[in-house]
Amino acid sequence: MTRTILFYEEHFIRFYREQDQKVKDKIQYVLELIKQVDRIPEKFLKHLTGTEGLYEIRIEYQSNIYRIFCCFDEGKLVILFNGFQKKTQKTPKNEIERGIELMNKYFQQKK
């Protein structure tokens, strides 16, 4: 199974460009895994509880934690929204809200 990864607007691209090369390599690795692997381990991709269809791609490098929001569309597409570096145990509410907002906007524009 291969999934197609789409980038919605420039949100992910901007986040990606700000990272150093080692973090970019790790992001690439996890994205390749999501493209290729049928059942992605929760360590790398997790549905956000209390959201309708919003997932977070989970990347850890050294002691840093990064999150990239995405959703599935028509079964195979993964749309990448905002990315950020996590500073606390809990994912910031404003980042989740932003992810939901971008996801809703994506589906609205698609209609």
Image (cartoon, rainbow, N blue to C red):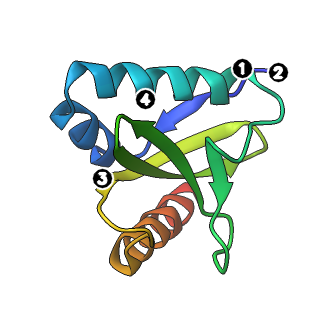
The amino acid type, in three-letter code, at marker 3 is: Gln
> Do residues under tags 4 and 2 come within 8 Å of each other at their CB atoms?
no
Q: Earlier in the sequence, mark 3 or mark 2?
A: 2
| Residue found at x 64% / y 24% | 33
- Depth check: give the residue in front, 6 or 62: 62
Tag 1 near tag 3, CB within 8 Å: no
Mark 3, Cα crowd under 10 Å, few <14 / some 14-19 / many 20+, is some
The residue that mark 3 highlights is 85
Q: Position of residue 27 (x, y in %)?
A: 43, 29
Which residue has dot 2 on it? 1
**Which is more toward the observer, 30 or 53?**
30
Looking at this view, is 76 or 29 the one in front? 29
Which residue is disc 4 drawn over?
A: 27
Q: Do the residues under discs 3 and 2 have CB atoms within 8 angstroms?
A: no
Quarter location, residue 56: bottom right
Instruction: Estimate the spatial distance between the alpha carbons at disc 4 and disc 2, rounded to whole Å.
Output: 20 Å
Name the secondary structure under disc 3. Answer: strand
Q: Is residue 61 left or right of residue 17?
A: right
Residue type at numbered disc 1: Gln
> In this picture, is 89 found above or below 6?
below
Q: How would you rate the neighbour count of disc 2 (Cα within 10 Å): few for under 14, some for 14-19, many for 20 or more?
A: few
The answer to whether marks 2 and 1 mark residues whose Cβ atoms lie closer than 8 Å is yes
The answer to which of marks 2 and 1 sits earlier in the sequence is 2
Q: Secondary structure at mark 4?
A: helix
The quadrant in which the N terminus is found is top right
Query: Nearer the N terminus, badge 1 or badge 4?
Result: 4
**Label drawn at residue 49:** none
Q: Residue at x 25, y 43 (%)?
A: 15
In the rendered structure, the answer to whether residue 46 lies left or right of residue 88 reads right
Task: Quote the CA–CA distance across marks 1 and 3.
Answer: 25 Å
The label on residue 36 is 1
| Residue 2 in the figure: left or right of residue 84 | right
